[in-house]
């Protein structure tokens, strides 16, 4: 995450800032957050972003480029 943030600070490329925000949101997501503090270090490969999600995040973007 630090590399993307440093890249954004030097280039002001909004895609790099968006990547930093996505990583931060992922880390504090309820699915990864531990109620005692901190977060889990892994998740199942088949995990979805939320309990109501039908697709993984970014899957719709990958479909655009097929």
Image: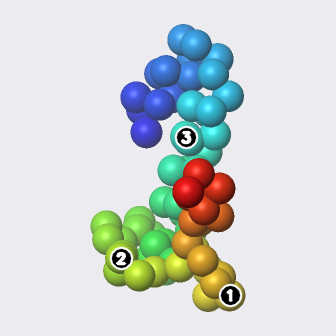
Dot 1 or dot 3: first in sequence order is 3
Q: Residue at label 1? A: 52
Q: Secondary structure at mark 1?
A: loop
At 47% from the left edge and 21% from the top edge, which residue is drawn? Answer: 6
What is the quadrant of residue 62 in the picture?
A: bottom right
Looking at this rendering, what residue extends furthest in the top direction?
10
Mark 1 or 3: in front is 1
Dot 1 or dot 2: first in sequence order is 2
Mark 3 or 2: in front is 2
| Marks 1 and 2, how far apart at CA | 17 Å
- Relative image position of residue 48 (x, y in whole percent): 53, 79
* Mark number displayed over residue 45: 2
| Marks 1 and 3, how far apart at CA | 24 Å
What is the quadrant of residue 56 in the picture?
A: bottom right
- Relative image position of residue 5 (x, y in whole percent): 51, 28
Q: Is residue 33 left or right of residue 59?
A: left
Q: Is the residue under label 2 in contact with that under label 3 (CB below 8 Å)?
A: no
Residue 14 in view in this figure:
yes
Q: Nearer the viewer, residue 16 or 37?
A: 16
Q: Secondary structure at mark 3?
A: helix
Residue 58 in view in this figure:
no
Q: Is residue 42 left or right of residue 37?
A: left
At 48% from the left edge and 72% from the top edge, which residue is drawn? Answer: 33
Q: Residue at label 3? A: 20
Q: Nearer the viewer, residue 54 or 6?
A: 54
At 55% from the left edge and 40% from the top edge, which residue is drawn? Answer: 20
Q: Quadrant of the N terminus?
A: top left
């Amino acid at each position: 995450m630090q590399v993307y943030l440093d890249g954004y600070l030097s280039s002001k490329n909004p895609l790099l800032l968006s990547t930093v925000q996505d990583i931060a949101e992922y880390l504090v997501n309820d699915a990864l957050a531990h109620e005692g503090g901190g977060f889990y270090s892994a998740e199942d490969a088949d995990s979805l972003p939320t309990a109501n999600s039908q697709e993984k995040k970014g899957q719709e973007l990958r479909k655009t480029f097929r």
